[in-house]
Image: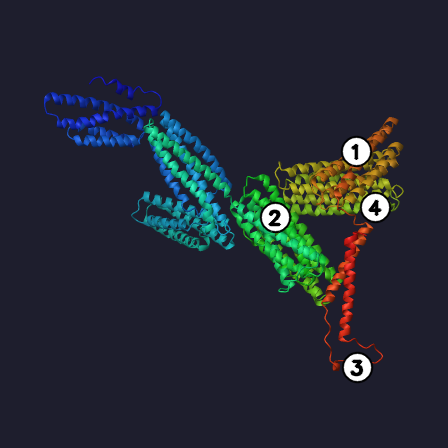
Amino acid sequence: PEVLPAWLLGSAVSCGGSVGAIWNQLCLAWGSPWPLLTETTPAARTLPQTPNILAAVRRSFCLFWTNFLIVCTEGIDFSGVDHYQIIILIILFKFTFFPSTLPRAVTESINQLITLCTQQAPGQKECDNALRELETVKGMLDNPNEPVSDLSYFDCIESVMENSKVLGESMAGISQNAKTGDLLVFGECVGVASKALCGLTEAAAQAAYLVGISDPNSQAGQQGLVDPIQFARANQAIQMACQNLVDPASSPSQVLSAATIVAKHTSALCNACRIASSKTANPVAKRHFVQSAKEVANSTANLVKTIKALDGDFSEENRNKCRIATAPLIEAVENLTAFASNPEFVSIPAQISTEGSRAQEPILVSAKTMLESSSLLIKTARSLAINPKDPPTWSVLAGHSHTVSDSIKSLITSIRDKAPGQRECDFSIDGINRCIRDIEQASLAAVSQSLATRDDISVEALQEQLTSVVQEIGHLIDPIATAARGEAAQLGHKVTQLASYFEPLVLAAVGVASKTLDHQQQMTVLDQSKTLAESALQMLYAAKEGGGNPKASHTHDAITEAAQLMKEAVDDIMVTLNEAASEVGMVGGMVDSIAEAMSKLDEGTPPDPKGTFVDYQTTVVKYSKAIAVTAQEMMTKSVTNPEELGGLASQMTNDYGHLALQGRMAAATAEPEEIGFQIRTRVQELGHGCIFLVQKAGALQICPTDSYTKRELIECARAVTEKVSLVLSALQAGNKGTQACITAASAVSGIIADLDTTIMFATAGTLNAENNESFADHRENILKTAKALVEDTKLLVSGAASSQDKLAQAAQSSANTITQLAEVVKLGAASLGSDDPETQVVLINAIKDVAKALSDLIGATKGAASKPADDPSMYQLKGAAKVMVTNVTSLLKTVKAVEDEATRGTRALEATIEYIKQELTVFQSSEVPEKTSSPEESIRMTKGITMATAKAVAAGNSCRQEDVIATANLSRKAVADMLTACKQASYHSDVSEEVRERALRFGTECTLGYLELLEHVLLILQKPTPELKHQLASFSKRVAGAVTELIQSAEAMKGTEWVDPEDPTVIAETELLGAAASIEAAAKKLEQLKPRAKPKVSDFPPTPSTHTPPLSDGNKLAHEKEMLFVLHFLTSTSILFIKKNGPL
């Protein structure tokens, strides 16, 4: 026919809209001709073969065939895949040329075409791909005993949440687009849903693995250092490629291909060796991997040269050279493959316990249900994409969607409920609480003198057990803190391990206390054990809250604080145990502690440094000098008080533990590596010296009169001092500039101390001039030296960004210059004469301010060395340099005003105001003071402020320069002492945060009020009027009000239970308690006395009749019982008196 039916043209051409809608119309169009075609073909065989009938059948068949051909042609354009387009054209070609000869083939080809075109409908391919992907990832859930990704447990939770949200949106898109017929968007939604489901499955499998290995009875898998299979395959590929290279039958293209294979695999082997050497802590393996990689790389380079020559000329000579070059490469690769096959480098699979497997089940069941229901949902959606008008199928789709949603909710709930470590934290908390109750019961028994003594073990063995347990607990603090901050899978193991140590801790602590005669030592051991248990309990609560979630940053500070408190508790009890052990010559625990610290210096890769070499160097120098000081004290005490050697040995043990820890980090951050190795070696040598010294101290305590042991101890102490100097020299070699800054800072501190002594002489009026010198003889020298110091200051500041050599020169030069300047200023002050001590003090205070500023500048320069320009330490350096310039300028002004009686008081007051401002800046900083003081000390220091205020008011009224100078000098000391005492008292451990803030606030208020008073006095000196003098009262009232508030804050620091240790009543009570304890100890010893065995008569000479006859056994026993009764009576009466009447 020349014109096609309208319905066919409408369906195939005039659909308009989306491709999906056109495809649906095409499917409807296909659905009309296919039955007619399949029915017309057999009818052509069965009808009578008359011309009219055949003509009618032919016309009918041609009409339907033409319609079918047009529709198929349209379908080809929408299939979008060349492969399927070709198949469809082949089938149509068969229809066109062979329909009359193959009537049966027509039906078969149409069926084939129906299947093919249905599969190629938009969205169908995406559904098939999604189903295949889901079937693939389903295997992850069968046996999750190895990690499937690097996600942490909380990353898994976030991944599940994100993917579930994406899945929900894509499922809504699948339903909506299947209903509207937008099949291209439908296919995109299916693809997105598939990726989300894969992400959900991967996160669920990883979470299940982490839950399984977090069980205390499970063992986590260990990733191998290398993959032996990779090395074996590379070895085989390289050998085959080398054979092709030397094969005479190989063509140039084959040679080039073989060379490419060799280069590819040797490069992969070298990279694997590099990664393995960086991961391993075994130095032998590290060197072997590096050396093997070098051999493979060198052999490959030589082979490449021969291959280039062979490529230019395929002669027998070049091929022979190539053959020779392949031998070293094959040998090197074989050796490397054999080394990589070492079982030490093989991966170890995880071993998940039965309890861990049970914990995995809820997660796995939910994930499997999700996958199964998702697969059914996609299959149902695929059917609806072809036939969207099928209500029963829509109901099935809704059911599957509901099942998917429920399974994802169950999955999220299961993962959250099974968070690793939470259950173990609860169990550990319960266990430690029980241990605390046991310690409390033992303490009550010790107070009532009813603590049962353990007779089945010696006190030495109990002390060793307690020391060992405490050390193991100390080793777990940092791993638990690390796990709580970001390693959820390890949290359960670590807290369970920690809790397991507290039961033996309690047994050992109670046993040691039961065998200790001194009541105070009993309570100390029990109290410190309880403190350790309570700090561990706080650590567990913080760890449980952190849960190993690296993103829960709000919990990390609490974890760090709890870890620090626990470390302090461990240190306290270790000090007590070491001292108790050393008193009887038992130093085995201290020797073990030092040896363990030494072993950690070579223990694998150190943790990531949290500071620079300068930071660690400073700390190492601090502990090294402390060890040297302790060694010197041990030399002295070995002669005078050998019984004190135990405490010194314990102190040395603790200092070396800190030194080894910081020395390890200093060695890791030192450059070059040779310096780091030298630091590590010398710290270990110092450890050996400390061990020998501690052992000699123990031996000397056992036999204090052994002169030979004394000589050996002195020799060991000298050896320790020498090894400390070697450690310091190694540190200095690693950073000359930093070490020079440390030395310069130490020298400046000595200068400041010397100036303080000079101020004392000047105040006492004993600083006299020599040879009748005048100040004019020293003025120019002071000014010249001060200017030189300014130049040195500039070099020092610039040295922070320069080389270490320049920094060292600047630090040394500045230290020498300040030394010279201090000397000439002291000479100048002495030349003023002892008749004017206040002016002398003003001048010395000025140089003292310069020295303090230089000390701060040196410290800031040391901290800023080798730091970038935007580092916070650079801003501190700029601030310190500014203060230094200000103080030097103030010194110059003071020097010029010293001989001018009309202005020197004003100048002194200006310098004091600047000094107080600098002290206030230090007071307001967040830096915690090194030591604390009592509230009484803070109250006592306010008296100086009161006196200085009265002095300032008097100076303002008199306007006499002498009064102003005296006020300036007094104000310096009064304000500085008040600020120091206030801050030290505020940061006492017993002071609450609220009281601390209040005390610091009123300390600042008092200082600001006093500054305003001094500034007003300065204004009066410049313009003395009655109105200004009248205002002095209001300024002094403000200072007095601030002082009152400060005193009230100090009173609040005391608390309700505070007592004054200098109160005579308290002293008497303490003495009485001590006497009662001594009597009680004596009574216990007397209880253990037994009557002596009756001696034989022949063993003793006859007793003269003039002597008192000895008591009989019965009389002796009666006499001893009477003594015991009297002592018991005295003891009980004393204790009862104290308990009933309280303090005397």
Mark 2 — residue?
537
Residue type for callout 3: Pro
Residue type for callout 1: Gly
Toward the viewer: 991 or 981?
Answer: 991
Near mark 1 (Cα within 10 A), the count class, few <14, some 14-19 or many ≥20, is many
Task: Report the Cα–Cα distance between label 3 and label 4.
Answer: 74 Å
Residue type for callout 2: Leu
- Toward the left, the furthest residue is 50
Task: Report the Cα–Cα distance between label 3 and label 2.
Answer: 70 Å
Q: Is residue 725 above or below residue 25?
A: below
Do we see residue 226 in this rendering?
yes
Identify the element where label 2 is drawn.
helix
User: Percent from the top left, x then y, of residue 378?
Assistant: 37, 34
Nearer to us of marks 1 and 3 is: 3
First-in-chain label (1 vs 3): 1
Nearer to us of marks 4 and 2 is: 2
Residue type for callout 4: Met
Mark 4 — residue?
760
As drawn, is 378 to the left or to the right of 1060? left
Mark 3 — residue?
1102
Task: Report the Cα–Cα distance between label 1 and label 3.
Answer: 90 Å
